[in-house]
Image (spheres, rainbow, N blue to C red):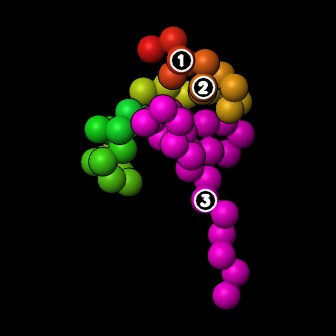
């Protein structure tokens, strides 16, 4: 059995999920709604942009 590396990280309480060639940024509350019910607060082109958004929020 091969364990897949998670494509979600937590940064300052926010969740950053890698999707295709970009990253979706979710608040803690939005993340809790579950797959199919949550919407990203921000869509970033790279990890640094996602972190910069969270830092400026």
Rendered residue at 66%/69% (across/down): 4
42 in the magenta segment: no
Residue at disc 2, secondary structure: helix
Residue 2 in the image, given as x and y percentages of width and height: 70, 81
Disc 1/disc 2 C-alpha distance (Å):
6 Å
Q: Quadrant of residue 1?
A: bottom right
Task: Find the residue positioned furthest to the bottom.
Answer: 1
Q: Which residues are magenta?
A: 1-25
Residue at disc 3, secondary structure: loop
Residue 10 in the image, given as x and y percentages of width and height: 51, 43
Residue at disc 1, secondary structure: helix
> Considering only order in the chain, which callout, 1 or 3, is on the residue closer to the N terminus?
3
- Residue 55 is marked as 1
5 in the magenta segment: yes
Q: In this image, 36 relative to 50: left or right?
A: left
Disc 3 designates what residue? 6
Report whether residue 23 is seen. yes
Give the quarter of the figure containing the C terminus: top left
Rendered residue at 67%/45% (across/down): 20
Of residue 56 and residue 17, the one placed in the foreground of this image is 56
Cβ atoms under marks 1 and 2 closer than 8 Å: yes
């Amino acid at each position: 059995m091969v364990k897949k590396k998670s494509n979600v990280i937590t940064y300052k309480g926010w969740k950053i999920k890698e999707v295709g060639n970009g990253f979706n940024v979710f608040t803690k509350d939005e993340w809790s709604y579950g797959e199919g019910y949550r919407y990203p607060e921000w869509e970033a082109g790279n990890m640094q942009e996602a972190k910069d958004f969270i830092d400026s929020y």
